[in-house]
Image (cartoon, helix red, strand yellow):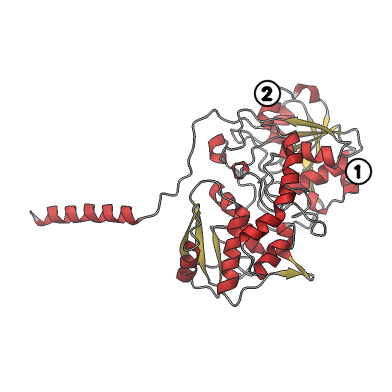
């Protein structure tokens, strides 16, 4: 055999061996089905006419677009609705702000509207503003997690409208985590906060924004005049990529759908002294700290045998947030598909970190543990500190999950 031919055979054989030794390809599955139509698209197609000429307060952000990425404010104006003001949640109207903006309001000259910051408006101030409108339209892409602040914004709007004659129209959007079911503790008394632990639910609540509005009105804001414009062709078990709707990052640190799924398990690490990759190109896919050796952590995490995840050792240097400008050792987390319990994954990872790294600490703010507000209970932290297995934590919160699920089912639309 000639020398060139031998090298070709060797290269092919090496490629085959490498492929056999490599982990599964990082692709999410996609089942064939009809495209999902958002509440915005269905509202524009059939339902908007009765609001023609009415004054509208629009609660939205950059995610309020249709399949062709046209903004809701432009589509509504073209149909004859008068947008008298806009309200934006965390990250602002354009979704680029990493920290809460300190301004109460600002004029958007390009859109010709005054935009108010929901984070700095009291219920009374918001109720006063809404008096300028005949109806409030709510159109924001949610993540399906209690600590993700957009569902708290929905609650805030409903509390402001409760007892008024002003209609609330929720334009529904898919729940990107609906395929995970419900998970985590129901919000315990004493662990409420205005933004990350306000909505009365389990940590993962498996409702769309429209369903969450129906649930909240039934139990907590009975005097809200609510209309939900539903999705078309939607099933709650769909991955977001299966809806065929474009993934518009709902916030700056969830650039891809995969990172958003990983976020459901990694957000609890915001309650400890590790970086979650904020200020890097892989937020919530990187975790680490200056005192971690990457290969060691990757091996420890791989030994947990979490079937839905793989771990790659990395170094990274955040440009903001924890450990700004410092070299952190850690891992990149790959989501490989399939359903899982975000609470179990986070519980097991944090337990591993606490047991193997002496520099591990729970973050505290004003004497309270941040993770307690993320989890909606102190049991998550306490059980880890006491060395209890996840099964004991799961058993302790099961009653709250069951009761929440019983109430939740009455308001499902899909």
Please name the residue that numbered disc 2 is placed on.
Answer: 45
Please state the horizontal and vertical placement of residue 252, each as a whole percent of the image. Answer: 62, 53
Query: Dividing the picture into quarters, in which one does residue 241 lie?
Result: top right
Q: Which mark is residue 329?
A: none
Q: Seen from this angle, which residue lies furthest left?
A: 1
Q: Secondary structure at mark 1?
A: helix
Left or right placement of residue 262 versus residue 365 in this view: left
Please state the horizontal and vertical placement of residue 136, each as a whole percent of the image. Answer: 81, 36
Camera-side residue: 181 or 1? 181
Q: Secondary structure at mark 2?
A: helix
Counting labels gives 2
The residue positioned 49% from the left and 31% from the top of the image is: 32
- For residue 200, above or below residue 282: above
Left or right placement of residue 288 versus residue 251 in this view: left
Q: Is residue 59 visible?
A: no
Left or right placement of residue 190 versus residue 260 in this view: right
Camera-side residue: 197 or 395? 395
Query: Dividing the picture into quarters, in which one does residue 74 lie?
Result: top right
Please state the horizontal and vertical placement of residue 7, each as a whole percent of the image. Answer: 16, 56
Disc 2 versus disc 1: distance between alpha carbons?
31 Å
Q: Is residue 87 visible?
A: yes
- For residue 146, above or below residue 225: below
The residue positioned 67% from the left and 59% from the top of the image is: 393
The residue positioned 46% from the left and 66% from the top of the image is: 299
- Nearer-N-terminus badge (2/1): 2
Picture quarter with the C terminus: top right
Please state the horizontal and vertical placement of residue 132, each as a whole percent of the image. Answer: 88, 37
Query: Pointer 1: residues within 10 angstroms few (<14), some, or many (20+)?
Result: few
Please name the residue that numbered disc 1 is placed on.
Answer: 128
Q: Seen from this angle, which residue lies furthest bottom?
A: 358
């Amino acid at each position: 055999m000639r020398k060139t031919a031998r090298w070709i055979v060797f290269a092919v054989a090496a490629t085959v061996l490498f492929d056999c030794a490599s982990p599964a390809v990082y692709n999410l599955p996609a089942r064939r089905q009809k495209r999902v139509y958002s509440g915005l698209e269905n509202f524009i197609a059939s339902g908007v006419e009765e609001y023609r000429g009415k004054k509208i307060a629009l609660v939205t952000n950059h995610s309020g677009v249709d399949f062709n990425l046209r903004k809701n404010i432009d589509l509504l104006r073209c149909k004859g609705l008068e947008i008298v003001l806009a309200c934006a949640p965390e990250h602002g109207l354009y979704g680029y702000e990493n920290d809460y903006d300190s301004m109460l309001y600002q004029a958007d000259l390009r859109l010709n509207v005054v935009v108010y910051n929901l984070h700095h408006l009291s219920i009374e101030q918001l109720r006063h503003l809404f008096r300028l409108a005949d109806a409030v339209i709510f159109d924001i892409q949610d993540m399906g997690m209690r600590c993700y602040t957009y569902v708290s914004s929905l609650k805030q709007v409903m509390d402001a409208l409760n007892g008024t004659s002003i209609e609330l129209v929720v334009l529904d959007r898919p729940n990107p985590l609906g395929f995970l079911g419900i998970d985590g503790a129901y919000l315990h008394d004493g662990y409420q906060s205005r933004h990350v632990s306000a909505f009365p639910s389990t940590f993962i609540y498996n409702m769309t924004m429209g369903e969450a509005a129906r649930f909240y009105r039934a139990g907590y804001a009975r005097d809200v005049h609510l209309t939900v414009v539903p999705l078309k062709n939607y099933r709650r078990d769909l991955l977001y990529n299966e809806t065929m709707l474009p993934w518009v990052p709902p916030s700056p640190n969830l650039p891809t759908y995969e990172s958003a799924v990983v976020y459901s398990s990694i957000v609890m690490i915001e309650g400890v002294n590790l970086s979650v990759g904020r200020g890097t190109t892989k937020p919530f896919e990187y975790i680490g700290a200056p005192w971690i050796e990457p290969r060691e952590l990757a091996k420890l995490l791989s030994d947990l045998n979490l079937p839905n995840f793989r771990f790659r050792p990395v170094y990274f240097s955040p440009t903001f947030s924890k450990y700004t400008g410092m070299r952190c050792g850690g891992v990149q987390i790959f989501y490989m598909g399939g359903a899982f319990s975000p609470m179990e994954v986070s519980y097991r990872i944090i337990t591993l970190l606490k047991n193997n790294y002496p520099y591990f600490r729970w973050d505290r703010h004003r004497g309270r543990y941040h993770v307690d507000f993320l989890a909606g209970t102190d049991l998550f932290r306490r059980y880890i500190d006491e060395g209890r297995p996840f099964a004991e934590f799961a058993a302790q919160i099961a009653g709250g999950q069951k009761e929440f699920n019983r109430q939740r089912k009455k308001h499902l639309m899909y």
